[in-house]
Image (tube, rainbow, N blue to C red):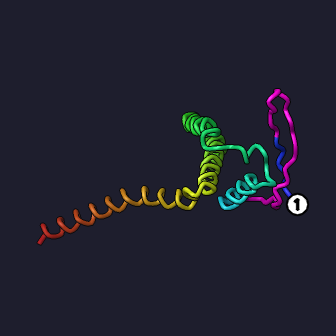
Amino acid sequence: DVYKRQVSTQSTWGIIITRRVNLAFKEERKYNVNDLINITKRLRAPNGCPWDREQTHRSIRQNFIEEVYEAAEAIDKEDNELLKEELGDVLLQVVFHACLAKEEGAFCFDDVVDLSLIHISEPTRLLSISYAVFCLKKKKKKK
């Protein structure tokens, strides 16, 4: 019932070291973003995965870029299954960076979501307001 992650790391001598990390969570049929956040926290915890604990924004920067390019490639191929997988990889990167930032006291995942919603709602609000003004002007002209 407990999920174990197999972790492979390369030592400074080029030797691949593989170990299993106990994440202490139950395997489910479906996960949500909160599960991903909690798993990421566990991987970064002192008794979590050594590789995940040593990562920084800079050390995984290239991984983030690669995942975004892979998502773009899936879009170009019009391959929804591949896009689903690649968007999951991008989401993992976003969650991981947010986890790092939270540890630094900079911001958390919820702050990222808040800003995303603000960016989405601003143009929508402006469009709605413009449409309402247009309708009012049109109504006044009919009188």
- Side of 113 where 84 appears, left or right: right
Q: Residue at x 80, y 37 (%)?
A: 9
Instruction: Provide residue 71's location: percent of width, then percent of height.
Output: 59, 39
Instruction: Provide residue 70's location: percent of width, then percent of height.
Output: 61, 36
Which one is in front, 136 or 108? 108
Magenta span covers which residues?
8-31
Which one is in front, 65 or 123? 65
Query: Is residue 59 visible in the rendered structure shown here?
Result: yes
| Residue hosting label 1 | 1
Instruction: Provide residue 26's location: percent of width, then percent of height.
Output: 82, 61
For the N terminus, which image quadrant?
bottom right
Question: What is the secondary structure assignment of the residue under circle 1?
Answer: loop
Q: Residue furthest top?
A: 13
Query: Is residue 78 visible in the rendered structure shown here?
Result: no
Name which residue type carries label 1.
Asp
Location of residue 49 with respect to 77 vertically, above or below = below
Q: Quadrant of residue 99?
A: bottom right
Report if residue 50 lies within the magenta region.
no
- Side of 80 where 14 appears, left or right: right
Which one is in front, 63 or 1? 63
Which one is in front, 109 or 53? 53
Instruction: Provide residue 83's location: percent of width, then percent of height.
Output: 61, 42
Q: Quadrant of residue 64?
A: top right
Q: Residue at x 41, y 60 (%)?
A: 121
